[in-house]
């Protein structure tokens, strides 16, 4: 099947688009990928929606800016696909299904509550393609963490590559998550902690820039050991997986009084140390860490990981994958798996009580 995956992650920077040919269990071909950034005004609404969503107790509620943000997310994803179609000479009839993750605004699995905004029905009508959406709800309702989801697909994505085992796939978006793939196929996955979100938020507030390009500002600063110690003194790091995070589970408070460069240096070190702490929960030390997401574009983070993990660290691009499109590709495959009733989550990835399928289907 020809599937398009759409991903708007916890970094809230924009919409990734990726085309994959797949039967849900193997990749037959990788197609092109694309990106539609959120505008500054759209990001401002999304930021307010994240704050307003904290009051949600009914996952269908859309208080404050959440309703406006949902319309923005839906329109942005539609525009992303329309631009993708135009750029690659595609039509709706060329695509079998679209996997639409939406934008997570609240994630409290302990309360059996997770909210991804975005109108799947409206997206299907506008694009003329069936859409699978609301991927996380079934897992959370069954008592799972509902996250991370991409780890189910990481073994599919790396199957044809000559990579050592055990292997760790580390996605550093707004929040970090790791997938451990053992030599025997064992799969363990969980959220590691903050990745880029705290750095991006500080930079946006102070400069209006969306992210620290090439980690240059962080590289020019000095890590504050006391602030880093306070950041690492969080109970989440000692909790055994499966576990997952809300984007706002951590705050950058200990770095607020630091100059921008020192704050970013310290927050980058925080991301690195959270991964180091996560590694202690893996069954074995990975022989290779493959880094995807925005963090793969940050040399300061990569240098810190190489220094602290004591293992080979490569970007997804360097091993033949796409650092930018990996998550979108995963949701293309997840959409096909949902159509076929195949599992999206497992006890080792989300703590689901058994392998579970999920997702809602919207037809045009």
Image (tube, grey):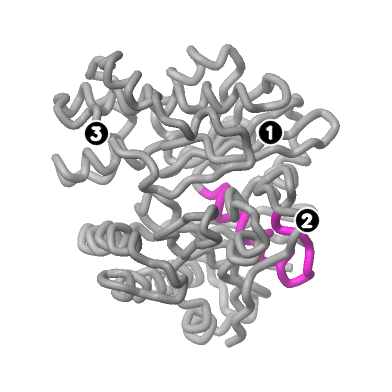
The quadrant in which residue 61 appears is bottom left
Disc marking residue 180? 1
Disc with the residue nearer the chain's start (1 vs 2) = 1
Closer to viewer: mark 1 or mark 2: 2
The quadrant in which residue 191 appears is top right
Q: Tell which of 229 and 99 is nearer to you.
A: 229
- Mark 2 crowd level (few <14, some 14–19, many ≥20, 10 Å Cα): some
Look at the numbered disc 3 and give the secondary structure of its residue.
helix
| 107 drawn magenta | no
- Mark 3 crowd level (few <14, some 14–19, many ≥20, 10 Å Cα): few
| Mark 2, residue position | 355
* Gap between marks 1 and 2 measured at Cα: 17 Å
- Segment colored magenta: 325-345
Look at the numbered disc 1 and give the secondary structure of its residue.
strand
**Which residue is depicted at the point 71% across and 61% down?**
21
- Please indicate, yes or no, whether residue 295 appears anywhere in the rendered image: yes
- Mark 1 crowd level (few <14, some 14–19, many ≥20, 10 Å Cα): many
Disc marking residue 253? 3
* Gap between marks 2 and 3 measured at Cα: 39 Å
Look at the numbered disc 2 and give the secondary structure of its residue.
loop
* Gap between marks 3 and 1 measured at Cα: 31 Å
Instruction: Examine the rendered structure and indicate whether residue 237 appears above or below residue 59.
Output: above
Left or right placement of residue 231 versus residue 110 in this view: left
Disc marking residue 9? none
Residue 353 spot, x, y in % from top left: 75, 54
Residue 157 spot, x, y in % from top left: 70, 45
């Amino acid at each position: 099947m020809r599937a398009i995956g759409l991903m708007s992650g916890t970094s809230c920077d924009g919409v990734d688009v990726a085309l994959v040919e797949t039967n849900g269990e193997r990749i037959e071909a990788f197609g092109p990928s694309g990106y539609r950034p959120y505008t500054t005004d759209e990001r401002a609404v999304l930021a307010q929606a994240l704050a307003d969503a904290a009051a949600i107790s009914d996952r269908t509620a859309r208080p404050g800016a959440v309703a406006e943000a949902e319309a923005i997310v839906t329109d942005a994803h539609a525009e992303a696909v329309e631009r993708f179609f135009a750029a690659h000479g595609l039509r709706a009839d060329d695509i079998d299904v679209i996997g639409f993750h939406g934008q997570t605004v609240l994630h409290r699995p302990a309360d059996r509550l997770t909210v991804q905004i975005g109108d799947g029905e409206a997206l299907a009508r506008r694009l003329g393609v069936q859409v699978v959406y609301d991927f996380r709800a079934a897992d959370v309702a069954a008592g799972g963490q509902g996250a991370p989801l991409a780890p189910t697909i990481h073994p599919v994505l790396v199957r044809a590559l000559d990579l050592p085992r055990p292997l760790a796939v580390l996605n550093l978006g707004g929040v970090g998550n790791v997938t451990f793939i053992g030599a025997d196929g064992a799969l363990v996955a969980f959220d590691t902690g903050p990745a880029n979100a705290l750095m991006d938020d500080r930079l946006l507030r102070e400069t209006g820039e969306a992210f620290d390009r090439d980690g240059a500002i962080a590289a020019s600063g000095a890590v504050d050991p006391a602030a880093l110690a306070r950041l690492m003194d969080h109970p989440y790091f000692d909790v055994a997986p499966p576990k997952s995070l809300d984007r706002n589970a951590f705050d950058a408070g200990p770095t607020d009084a630091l100059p921008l460069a020192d704050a970013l240096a310290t927050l980058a070190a925080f991301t690195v140390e959270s991964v180091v702490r996560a590694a202690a929960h893996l069954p074995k030390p990975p022989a290779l860490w493959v880094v995807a997401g925005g963090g793969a574009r940050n040399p300061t983070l990569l240098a810190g990981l190489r220094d602290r993990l004591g293992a080979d660290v490569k970007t997804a691009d360097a091993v033949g994958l796409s650092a930018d499109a990996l998550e979108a590709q995963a949701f293309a495959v997840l959409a096909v798996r949902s159509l076929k009733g195949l599992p999206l989550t497992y006890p080792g990835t989300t703590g689901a009580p058994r392998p579970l399928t999920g997702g809602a289907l919207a037809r045009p």
